[in-house]
Image (cartoon, rainbow, N blue to C red):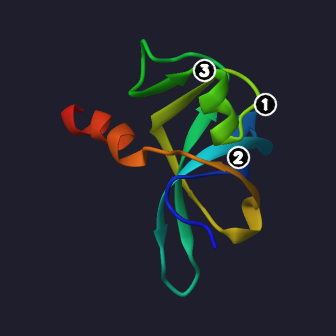
Amino acid sequence: MLKPADIILVHFPFTKNKKKEYKIRPVLLLEVIKHEVSLYKVCQITKTDRSDKFIGSWIDDETKLSVLGLKENSFINLQNVLYTTKPYIIKKIGTHPDLENLLFLLEDF
């Protein structure tokens, strides 16, 4: 069962040549919303350091990357949030050990 702080792989939507496509990307699960169908509120994780433009966390420590299940230095972008459902989720790859402190960054936003 998935829970907040899980790092999961999902089919992440993007637009290419005005056509909606999907990439397999890691995301951080922020919230599970239970309705008739569970919705998963997630935020983007990318290899590009965007800490100068967005609120989030740059991770370049090998131990932290291993715990998160990430293979490369990564930026958790707390401002690129979307909702997804179970069919788009591939699998869990790790867990963020300190989601509460990470979300604290948003309080000043």
Horizontal side of 87 relative to 103 (left or right) equals right
Q: CA distance from mark 2 to mark 3?
A: 25 Å
Residue 71 in view of the camera: yes
Quarter the N terminus occupies? bottom right
- Name the residue at the front extreme: 63
Local secondary structure at mark 1:
loop
Q: Earlier in the sequence, mark 2 or mark 3?
A: 2
- Name the residue at the top extreme: 52
Question: Are the residues tagged 2 and 1 within 8 Å (C-beta)?
Answer: no
Residue 32: image x %, image y %?
49, 68
Question: Are the residues tagged 2 and 3 within 8 Å (C-beta)?
Answer: no
Q: Nearer the viewer, residue 62 or 104?
A: 62
Question: Are the residues tagged 3 and 1 within 8 Å (C-beta)?
Answer: no
Instruction: Nearest to the eye among marks 2 and 1: give it.
Output: 2
The residue depicted at 69 percent of the width and 70 percent of the height is 86
The disc labelled 3 sits on which kind of residue?
A: Asp
Residue at which label 2 appears: 12
Give neighbour class at mark 1: few <14, some 14-19, many 20+ (Cα, 10 Å): few
Residue 104: image x %, image y %?
28, 39
Residue 89: image x %, image y %?
73, 60
The disc labelled 1 sits on which kind of residue?
A: Asn
Residue at which label 1 appears: 17
Residue at which label 3 appears: 61
Local secondary structure at mark 2:
strand
Q: Quadrant of residue 98?
A: top left
